[in-house]
Image (cartoon, grey):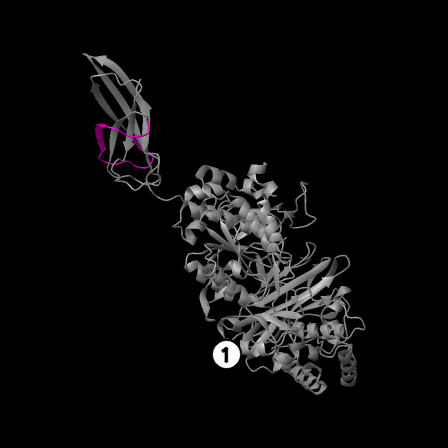
Amino acid sequence: MQRFFDLGRILASSRMLRKRGSDLNAQRPKKETRKDYGQSPIFPNRFRTVLILAHVLLFAAWVLSAQAEVLNLRPVPVDPALLRDPALAKVSRDLIVLQQEFRANQQLPILQAFRPSNPVVRIVAGRVVIDAVATGDARLLLADLKALGLQRGAIRDRMVSGQLPIAAISELADLQSLKLVRPAYVMSRAGLVDSQGDVAMRSDIARTDFEVDGTGVVVGSLSDSFDCAGTQEAVDVGSGDLPADIVVLDDTACPGIDEGRAMMQLIHDVAPGAAQAFHTAFNGQADFAEGIVELATTAGAHIIVDDVIYFAEPMFQDGIIAQAIDAVSAKGVAYFSSAGNEARDSYESEFRDSGVVGPLGGIRHDFDPGPGVDDLQTVILGTGTTIFSFQWDEPFFSVSGEPGSASDLDILLYLEDGTFTFAGGFALNVGGDPVEVFAITRNGPPIAVQIGLELNEGPPPKLMKYVFFGPAETHVGEFDTASGALYGHPNAAGAEAVGAAFYAKTPDFGVTPARLEPFSSAGPTPILFDSLGNRLAKPEIRNKPEVIGPDGTNTTFFFAGEDPEPDGFPNFFGTSASAPHAAGVAALMLQANSKLKPAEIFAGLEKTADDMETPGFDFDSGHGFIQADAAVEAVLPQAPDLTGEWILIRSRPLLGQYLVRGRLRVSNIGNEKAGRFRIFFHLSDDGITPGKIIARRTIWAGLLPGESKIRAFRLLSPESLAGKFVIAVVDSKNEVAESDETNNNIAITIP
């Protein structure tokens, strides 16, 4: 059912959209600066439009209009109305383009391996990973999608994720159970081996000083894949780079680059005694959220870490992944997430009416905050693929249900001279999710283009924001607000967002303070809506990122070609590497004090971190660079620890007998007061086994942490006791619950 090839429906939608554009124009006050792109020179009349449509559709116009043309950034003659066909409002354009590309590939004389032109669309064995939102009961939608061949289906609230046969995309528009569907736009944070981060964070010292290695703690990881080849886990276990008996709950997102296994190697370097588990995060948002819960319940994870971002995760509301994090956190699981590698690659602003109408009938935003008007913003595209996620302050239908977004906005890409390229994000958003995601690929050297943010319907946003992901050369050329780029589930209240500093630029490698990686994502992004879609009385500003961990450290295989030392082992860069380092330290802390709650783990990391930039917390470097030894010490159980030290032992003849005198300094080396306790002095033949009690002493007032008191004894013996031992047993009746009960017996030889 090729519904999107129905010319009658296309022309009908064309007329409707052109009328809507006219109605919008009629309602707005005209300015002398207004330009009307409704009758573009590219489309001189309706008859030519029909001819263009007929020919371009038969020539897979969707493919051309979406990604292929952006290789050279040339505009393609496609009717703007087609790009916003209301009949296809619930099926994303990227899915329609994907199906046309797939069909074209199937019709080649010699079948070739299919690769979509859109690099953020994930394909697994002829299936596309999707995030679909139900109009009502998500179970009905799951059943309908399974009837179309959906595999790996997962439900979380209103969302259904899974792998849908590409050939079934044309059937989606007819599903009454479907509100909207888009590709599951996803990316990880990557940017015989021991991680140098172990030294940089001083976790090697923590293991030695506090005798911890993560034993008894389970750490779960979420990333793309673990062992797609099916052979590398055994190799890593054999070389000591992974623990044995890893619990792999789901590794079905292959082909992948096994970034999850690289993360787990880093965790093992920091906490070699910890058990580990894995679940892919690349099968859609619903499956990601369910994977968090499964790691906590099925695998029994005490700590979970991920390095993934879904571009369509809500910015101004906690989405289903963030809510899953908060749920497991409430049950005692400490969750860590990579902050991202986008620094301040973000623009945000209130919508300002420029008085200029764009090619799809929307009114353009005025980027100039001053008295002037500038309806397009210069952006430099670097070589490679850049992805834009554009959102505004409306609640997500996929999170909170009706009413969804009240406004419909587009983000459109233009050449430097203002010519529309037909690339961008222009879904129909009213009643759905306030988000547009699009990818643009530049094969040549960096080039200046322009961005337009255009309001088609509904109230103008009080806050809108885009974040871009891509080559280092990509940057905003004018009116750059350099806003925080951290959003989505790393911004969850229950998550500890971890930024990155190159290990070689940290204090233990001679650089003080540690230097933040220039790409490490900054905060904040305000939370404006609760989970029910109600606007908060006051924006919630969360202090993100919280801490900084090391990156650029060694693994056995990841990332190939990155070896700056060089030492023959590849180096793992990005917050994908820093987050598992932090999770490993948390495992050491949890072994040192098994009663820690997630908030106490996070507080221990934050208050002991080395400050990096602005004194105190800042939205770039958080509380500073992790110091594992100090963090472990800070969370040691609050309990007294009693011990003693002999400061005198003497023996001499006295009136035909022998006098033995001794003095013992008794100390509380713990971190909590000890109440009343007793000390018994014993004779001993071997210095190990206490014998006859020769004296009893009591410290009635107890001891404060760090306090000491001296207790003495005298003994008259009819015979010399030289060569025997006196053993002082501190807290001999076990009246004090101590953190260490092994240091209470103190022996000394009688001279």
Image coordinates for residue 335, horizontal then vertical, percent:
48, 56
454 above or below 8?
A: above
The type of residue carrying mark 1 is Gly
For the N terminus, the quadrant is: bottom right
Image coordinates for residue 576, horizontal then vertical, percent:
58, 53
Left/right placement of residue 158 relative to residue 103 reads left
- Please give the residue where the numbered disc 1 appears in the rendered image: 136
In this view of the protein, can residue 625 be seen by the observer?
no
Question: How many dots with numbers?
Answer: 1
461 above or below 613?
A: below
**What residue occupies the far right of the structure in this picture?**
109
Left/right placement of residue 229 relative to residue 529 reads right
What stretch of residues is rendered in magenta? Answer: 687-709
User: Which residue is nearer to you in this view: 188 or 533?
Assistant: 188
User: Which residue is nearer to you in this view: 724 or 553?
Assistant: 724
The chief SS type of the magenta part is loop
Left/right placement of residue 233 relative to residue 689 reads right
Image coordinates for residue 130, horizontal then vertical, percent:
60, 70
Image coordinates for residue 125, horizontal then vertical, percent:
66, 68
